[in-house]
Amino acid sequence: MGKSAPPSRRALCIAVTYAGDRTRWLPDTATDVNNIASLLLANEYAVTVMCDAPSLVREPFCIRPTAFKIREELRLLTQWLNREPGRQGWFHYSGHGWQAPNDDGNESDGLDELLVPCDWRRSGYISDDELSALVATLRPEAELMVVMDCCHSGTMLDLPFTTKPSGAVVASNAPCFPAPRDSASDADGQSALVFLLSGCRDDDLSLNVFDVRGDARWSGAATTALLQCFRPGDTPHLLLGKMRSFLKSHGFTQQPQLSCSHPFDRPWSFLSSGGSVNAWVERLKFIGASTCKCLDTDVRSDGGLAGKGCGRGGGGGGGAPGRRG
């Protein structure tokens, strides 16, 4: 029997639980990564898992998501994508998101969006400018799907186009990103095909859901919506519309966002099969005093907000879900 060809798809899945920090703890992020990794493995991705609570994930070996290690794994993913044409990548992040004042004037709201690694108190955050600069180095033939299930994630990559559920594509201001390529088959001198599917707007919260599979576990609302709604052959705007409708029908106000490196509305090729994951998502139940993925805000069970900022954090079991911001 001949040797099998190396995979042309590679994924990096990050679950930051903030284990040991009771005020930031997000065990539900591990559920997200378990489910997403299962879907990606079914679609022939080679998957790298990062988690700071290894006992919560199915992967026998995973990497601790410190700021240094996240940057290193992202660099390795982009290097792999650049090595040969036609490769596809997937980057999934479930954890806290945050905002900080922008210093270079390239944000319309004056704020940078930030990822929060497990060692954020010592090593700080990873900014949207840093992420945008990294994906801008991708070769034109590369394709990358990014999913951010965290608060303040709407423009986490500062991509030049935003897709609406109606199918309209609106240009945005992303000065550091290369010019969009004209088509998937004519990429010379243009940008890679990059998508960002984010859990909410920059000024919004990403929430969690409880008891999705009847196992008394928390999981991210946006990740749950993605797993429930995706079907092979979906176009970007169709999937976005289905995710928003799904969340709205279950009482959520957050609105997932979709941005891209250039106008694109053909069926996605990142996933060819929904796998068995869709069957897991049968029902949503929100109980207790709800919170979101955020660092300093409480979200009451009636949907109101208290305090400032936001983030995905909190406890498990029958307690309050976390806020991812």
Image (tube, rainbow, N blue to C red):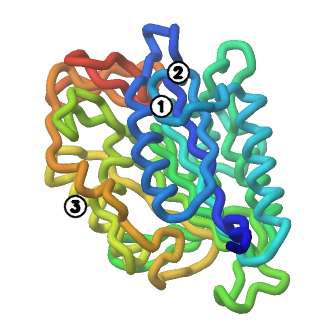
Residue flagged by tag 1: what amino acid is it? Val
Decide: is 42 above or below 264.
Answer: above
Q: Which image quadrant is residue 249 in?
A: bottom left
**Mark 2 and mark 1 in contact (Cβ < 8 Å)?**
yes
Quickly name the residue at label 1: 57
- Look at the image and tell me in which quarter the N terminus lies: bottom right
Q: Residue under label 2, please give it.
A: 53
Amino acid identity at mark 2:
Ala
Task: Tell me the SS state at disc 3.
Answer: helix
Label total for image: 3
Query: Three-letter amino acid code at disc 3?
Result: Ser
Residue at horizontal 78 percent and vertical 53 percent from the top: 134
As measured in the structure, the alpha-carbon distance from the residue carrying label 1 to the one carrying label 2 is 7 Å
In the rendered view, does 246 fall on the left or right side of 148?
left
Q: Residues within 10 Å of mark 1 (few under 14, many from 20)?
A: many
Q: Which residue is at 40% across, 45% downward?
A: 35
Q: Residue at x 62, y 77 (%)?
A: 262
Secondary element under disc 2, as helix, strand or loop, is loop
Q: Which residue is mark 3?
A: 245
